[in-house]
Image: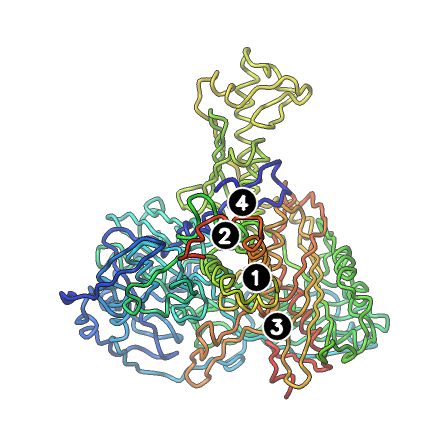
Amino acid sequence: MSFPETGFPITLTVNGVSRSLVLEDARVTLLDALRERLDLTGSKKGCDRGQCGACTVLLDGVRINACLALAVSHDGASITTIEGLADGDVLHPVQAAFVDHDGYQCGFCTPGQIMSAVGLIREGQAGDDPERVREGMSGNLCRCGAYAGITEAVLAAHAAMNAPDVLPGGNLSEDAA
Amino acid sequence: MTERMRHGASIGQPLTRRDGPAKVTGAARYSADFHPGGMLHAVMAVSAIARGRVTHLDVAAAKAHPGVVDVMSPENAPALAKSPDEKDNPFAFRLDLLQNGNVRYANQPIAVVIAETLEAATEGAALLNPRYEAETPSVELGGETIFTPDSVGAGSPTQEGSGDIEAGFASAGTRMEATYETAAQYHNALEPHTSVAQWDGDRLTLHTPTQALWIAKGRLAGLFGIPQENIHIVSHYLGGGFGSKGFISSPQILGIMAAKLVGRPVKLVTRREQMFGSVGHRAATRQTLKLGAKADGTLTALDHHTLTLTSRHDDFVEACGLIARHLYASEAIATTHAVSRADIGTPIFMRAPGEASGSVAVESALDELALQLDMDPLELRLKNYAEVEPITHRPFSSKALRECYAQGAERFGWSKRPRQPRQMRDENGLRVGWGMGTATYPAGMMQGEARATIRADGTALVETAAQDMGQGAWTVLAQIAADGIGLDGDRVELRIGDSDLPNGGLAGGSTGTATSGSAVHAATQGALAALEDLAVNDRASPLYGAGNAGTVAEGGRLARRDDPTRSESFSDILARAGKDSVEAKGTGAGDPASRKTYAMHAHGAVYAEVKVDPDLGQIRVTRLVGAFAAGRIVNPRLVRSQYYGGMIWGVSLALHEHAVLDTRSGRVMNPNLAEYHVPVNADVPSLEAILVEEHDPHVNPLGIKGVGEIGITGTAGAIANAVWHATGTRVRDFPITLDKLLG
């Protein structure tokens, strides 16, 4: 059976680019809109119910689980995904820190971890306290057990981004930073 | 972004991952990230009962939903060339591919809905509203007839031992007996089992995560009745396997069948709750340890009996007894296994299969024995240090376990540990406990092949169908290739994760790097030999006539071994010979003679500190120090990550993971990542992994042992022992949760 003619038009600003799409179904999550409609597959689906954090993106600058958000509820929103973090070939400080500190193994949770870390650093809640970083990153499961490297990476990125004499690289425009 | 890569003579360097930039930018495409044109979405419906049969599916309701294209059920599933129940080798585990309406465990696939969108397929699956003829399931350990299996684990003997166990107990001054239970655990890789399948006539292109591309290719060729070369599996990135992706699973194959049914590409992604059924798990165990010792701690008897579960329809037996066959010297050893059947999905290999569950019981038991003997637990282990492999009496190919014990103990501060429990508190009044355990895992090898090509532009190409599931194959195989061929890493192109490449073996059993790395090394040596052959027979080459002296490769040049000033670049040799490239294939496999002569295992020692709230029973691991010896370390940065990952799995086994089965319905009651607990970042303490030097001339030419699984062993027992040391309460039922401390 085919879909009805009418749909749900929405416009999202994704990684700084305006994207308009007509959803044939109101049940499309933000995650599935990104992955299946916009081919932004960096955000991952690990559980589809907000328990693993692999789908973490920034929604108007705040980290959320994209699998728990309905796309139609966020018409007009600004979204930053893992694909929008680096500035061309220059990695965002959090991305660079994950490479340097081996904050990953299989890499499946990594986009969510990194977006969550960017959000956490922005929230200014954890600072340079490893315990608070661990708590603040605990919505993002890593089954490989790369937590030691993840914590180190977040602390190192926090230090790099807060160093007064260093301009942070990467896309730190209003959307992402 | 390649500037983040570091270069240099490769093996032993802590290089960052070659696949790192792709992974941190979202550019790395995992199986579910592929969308061939015209692709449909498939969603499985799974059984809500554990035993019986499906009597009705409301296919009409599903098909009436907008966007639904078809429903695949036993009525219309494409015919297979071979029955999914046919078992032509012990590891061809029986599959559930809609071959009939029978249900043999909860969450078994019973239908697949295929639709234009994921939302429509999901709703369609819900609309099927299955009706069943249910039978009473049995899912309890020992709930049905207990029998002795033919073999355990990967074909190990069910029973093995040495000496007279009764005499051993008779001569013991001290005896202890205790029974330990471990819970059913599910791998729960973050990436669900996925297929993106596309048929072109009788040719199949498949994006699916698999730890063993060629094994998967072989199974699919048999099921679909097509030649292996018609199957192209692409799996460049794999989002966690831990054994659950060692053999291709039913959901992955159902996606392929769905694509065949509708004649369009199909994506099928297993839902998280559906992963508690048809994709394997680590079965629950009940293990009885009986130990006998002299007053000085010398073991006279070590008896380890395991009772575990397998499915009603297939055989896989958790081999807990292997640990006791390899680890401690004892005058007599007996290891036995028994199993009972249940209406569950077939258990399968899960990170350190057998060893993980076995280790926690053995290490707990030794701790209990140490208390009875009033001995330090480390002293007891040193007292029974195996100088040769117990039972077989073979020498070890290498064994730096003493150094592991010593370096770990020194770093941890073990010598300050009070012998008695409940002696330490922190500044907040939490009880503090210290425990330790021995880690061990076999240094096995599979068979694999690789192809190396040296090209006229001075670069090399190395290819093998190995898999990187996070252990670092993309990086370490390139390191091995770079050193093998005498090139900088950035001049080596590596291709892996593709079934059209030479068989790379299995990323599993801690054999991956040893096997595919040996194959890569052998291939590079073959390609260099071909290059040398060109040069030494060419009068125009400075290497002419160097055949007897031989050549060495370094920095993209071949040089005379006896006169390094006489050398020539790879490019010049090939250019003058008028060739674009030379290539060779190499094989990696264990040498049967040395594997007969020597026992080959990695070893380690793990020390744990826990803090327990005296009022609430809340347990936190606060410190873990592991010291491991595993032969040559190709990349210390990545090896440390493997140890950390294993140690966190040890935390998980000791304190977190527990699939709770409802014995009436046979269903897992916590099939999700909120209620099936795995460690989060805040659960993970300060970790330290010491890489203890070990040289192994026998295990393979590169001296590599595996590192992926050993970290779990030792760790779980160390934590259990630390909990006892903090509280004085010995919990023998894993995971250790606060209710068991307060009860």
Q: Amino acid at mark 2?
A: Gln
Chain letter of disc 3 in the image = B
Residue matched to label 1: A147
- Asked if labels 1 and 3 touch by Cβ distance under 8 angstroms, the answer is no
Q: Which residue is pictured at 34% across the width and 73% down the height?
A: B46
Tell me if residue B158 can be seen: no
Which secondary structure lies at badge 3?
A: helix
Along the line of sight, the residue nearer the viewer: B462 or B589 = B462
Q: Nearer the viewer, mark 4 or mark 2?
A: 2
Question: Considering only order in the chain, which callout, 2 or 1, is on the residue closer to the N terminus?
Answer: 2
Residue matched to label 3: B654
Q: Nearer the viewer, mark 3 or mark 4?
A: 4
Residue matched to label 2: A95
Q: Amino acid at mark 4?
A: Thr
Q: Amino acid at mark 1?
A: Tyr
**Picture quadrant where residue B119 is located:** bottom left
Residue matched to label 4: B475
Residue A34 in the image, given as x and y percentages of width and height: 33, 59
Both on one chain, marks 3 and 2? no
Chain letter of disc 4 in the image = B
